[in-house]
Amino acid sequence: GQNIDQPTEMTATEGAIVQINCTYQTSGFNGLFWYQQHAGEAPTFLSYNVLDGLEEKGRFSSFLSRSKGYSYLLLKELQMKDSASYLCALKAAGNKLTFGGGTRVLVKP
Amino acid sequence: GAVVSQHPSRVICKSGTSVKIECRSLDFQATTMFWYRQFPKQSLMLMATSNEGSKATYEQGVEKDKFLINHASLTLSTLTVTSAHPEDSSFYICSLEVLQGRLDEQFFGPGTRLTVL
């Protein structure tokens, strides 16, 4: 099976940078995904890593170290609309995604 | 990306009744769809994998006789919560997977909020 850990909540200031860490244990690995979910809405895809290193997509970047079972999502130039839950999800084998508990990020003015 | 719709978006029902939730892929044919459940302030939990033309594959701990899944066409999967009880109240979300270049990305429907009184 898989085990995924991420912090429950984080608070940051508008315009700042926040890093959300995700650690995992798994017997197989086919990719690590990050999703954003606003309250009462469906998750939307942010980023994906299958190889070690940094993937940058505008204000959002994601990093992966497979040997350490570690990923992070970096949010730069925070905006109020970035207040949401951020879900780390692991694809171990086949096409099933296993989600972490999610990190609620609160952006303050 | 793929556009996924769900109907209804919200449903309130009495305990003991059955509720059907539809998940439609509007622009891709989906041989596989996924059904998730999300309780308040918790993450998504995969309930089952819906396979077109065959039986769904349920995750451990999910009762297949209570959560009936039918995937009769390449664009429609339905989840029926039978004899619903208050503990079944949750946010139900479906998704489908689409190959986008090198990435198999899952696209999610908007979710259905079920409240059982």
Image (cartoon, rainbow, N blue to C red):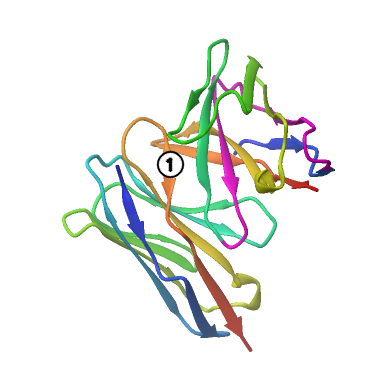
Residue B86 vs B24, above or below: the answer is below
Q: Where is residue B63? Give x, y as percent.
A: 54, 30
What residue sits 62% from the left and 59% below the top? B40
B89 horizontally vs A106: left or right: right
For label 1, the crowd category at 10 Å Cα-Cα, with few meaning under 14, some 14 to 19 and many 20 or more, is many
Q: Quadrant of the N terminus of chain B?
A: top right
A13 horizontally vs B26: left or right: left
B68 horizontally vs A25: left or right: right
Residue B10 visible in the snapshot? yes
Q: Where is residue B94? Give x, y as percent.
A: 62, 37
Residue B25 visible in the snapshot? no
What residue sits 48% from the left and 62% below the top? A102
The residue closer to the viewer here, B99 or A6, is A6
Q: Looking at the picture, which amino acid does disc 1 mark?
A: Leu
Q: Report in which chain the residue with disc 1 lies.
A: A
What residue sits 72% from the left and 31% below the top? B83
Q: Which residue is mark 1?
A: A97
What is the quadrant of residue A105 in the picture?
Answer: bottom right
Decide whether residue B93 is among the magenta residues: no
What residue sits 42% from the left and 56% below the top? A100
Residue A87 vs A74, above or below: the answer is above
The residues colored magenta run B13-41
> Seen from this angle, which residue lies furthest left?
A67
Decide whether residue B38 is among the magenta residues: yes
Q: Where is residue A61? Give x, y as percent.
A: 41, 64
Q: Where is residue B115? Give x, y as percent.
A: 77, 48
Which element carries disc 1, helix, strand or loop? strand
The residue closer to the viewer here, B34 or B90, is B90
B10 horizontally vs A59: left or right: right
User: How many numbered marks are there?
Assistant: 1
